[in-house]
Image (cartoon, rainbow, N blue to C red):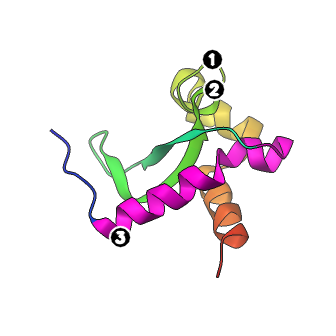
Amino acid sequence: MAKRPNKETQAKYNKMVDFGCVVCQKVYGVYTEPCIHHFTGAGMGLKSTEKYIPLCHTHHQGKKGIHHIGTKNWESKFGSQQELLDWYIGKNET
């Protein structure tokens, strides 16, 4: 069973949910309710606990989603996960 995020991480997740899907915001300028997508590459198929972005169902697990069409295809359409994370951070710096 996955470990619950600590308060700091949960606050970051909540801020991302309030922001919306990073792809929908960047590409279409609209809010869509997201879930949190963790980058892979932590080894042995594990998700990263430090790098994640908000993605709506369509861009996360739907027919246009990173888990459906694969990371390389998805990133060729929408940009790399790191680029989207950097864009999100730039929009949310305080």
The local secondary structure at tag 3 comes to helix
Identify which amino acid the numbered label 2 is placed on: Thr
The one nearer the camera, 80 or 50, is 50
Q: Is mark 2 on a helix, strand or loop?
A: helix
Residue 79 rendering spot, x and y as whole percentages? 72, 47
* C-alpha span from label 1 to label 2: 6 Å
Cα gap from disc 1 to disc 3, whole angstroms: 32 Å
- Indicate the amino acid at tag 3: Glu
The x and y percentages for residue 92 are 66, 70
Overall secondary structure of the magenta stretch? helix
Tag 1 and tag 3, C-beta contact below 8 Å: no
When asked about the image quadrant of residue 65, the answer is top right
Mark on residue 8? Answer: 3
Q: Which residue lies furthest to the left in this view?
A: 1
Going 61% across and 59% down the picture, which residue do you hit? 85
- Tell me the quarter of the picture where residue 66 sits: top right
Q: Residues within 10 Å of mark 1 (few under 14, many from 20)?
A: few
Q: For marks 1 and 2, give the one nearer the viewer.
A: 2
Which dot marks residue 63?
Answer: 1
Image-based side of 41 in relation to 6, left or right = right
Q: Determine crowd level at label 2: few under 14, some 14-19, many 20+ residues with C-alpha closer than 10 A.
A: some
